[in-house]
Amino acid sequence: MGLRINDIAPDFTADSTEGRIEFHKWIGDGYAILFSHPRDFTPVCTTEFGAVAQLAEEFEKRNTKVIGVSVDSVEDHLKWKRDIEAFAGAPANFPIIDDTSLSVSKAYDMLPADFYLPTEGRTPANSATVRSVFIIGPDKKVRLTMTYPMSIGRNFAEILRALDAVRATDGVPFATPANWVPGQDVIVALSVPTDEAKAKYGDLDIRLPYLRYARHPG
């Protein structure tokens, strides 16, 4: 069975472009985004790593670390980073994990249903980690997952928006409506009675008895 929301994210120790990493220790007391890629020197992956490099300041503002997983070696990762940085026009200052053993890919159930491992001549299609994203909280629990097929590049603006929504609702009785962005009203959880919600959050915009909007305190 794959990882579920609120499961503890599997811990691991692995080599990376920034040295040996103990994952839970590396996360520290903030949020983390773990995202996987089929292989180095592949076109869609290069555009995605470039997008992450360009968003470095945005992740830092949100006390969030990002870390990539690819099934090649640290040596290959370091060479590939030159291409990423040339394409993005920004430094790729985040670690990329050496997952030649596929241990991280398997622990996070990233592999497609029909994967197989030939003894030689392995291609991205053989051992491909699908394009998976895990947002992990400070308590090391999985807050959100996204999975894309190999042929579709991810929208990192949406990943950033989802991170904002996770942070806005983490540990408080709120949810975010469709297409929510920071600054917009949030939905009050059904567990909070209307009178109590008004006392805590001020006037509510009550669209339906079960759909009550409030300004986010943050």
Image (tube, grey):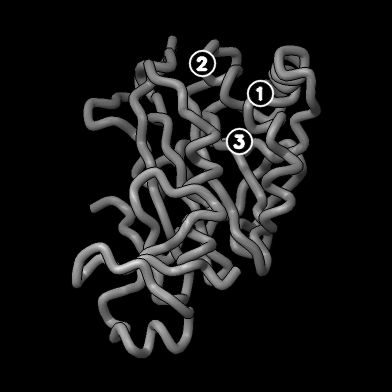
Q: Pick the residue in front: 189 or 114.
A: 189
- How packed is label 1: few (under 14 Cα within 10 Å), some, or many (20 or more)? many
Disc 3 residue type?
Answer: Asp
Q: What residue is at 52 percent from the left and 66 percent from the top?
A: 140
Residue 6 appearing in the image: no
Q: Secondary structure at mark 2?
A: helix
Lower position in the chain sequence, tag 2 or tag 1: 2
Disc 1 residue type?
Answer: Gly
Tag nearer the camera, 3 or 2: 2
Instruction: Report the side of 13 relative to 145 (left or right).
Output: right
Q: Secondary structure at mark 1?
A: helix
**Residue at numbered disc 2:** 44
Q: Pick the residue in front: 79 or 207.
A: 207
Q: What residue is at 29 percent from the left and 68 percent from the top?
A: 206
- The location of residue 59, given as percent across then percent down, is 67, 47
Up the image or down, 159 lies above or below 113; here it is: below
Q: CA distance from mark 2 to mark 1?
A: 10 Å
- The location of residue 172, given as percent across then percent down, is 45, 76
Lower position in the chain sequence, tag 3 or tag 2: 2
Q: What residue is at 23 percent from the left and 32 percent from the top?
A: 113
**Residue at numbered disc 3:** 98
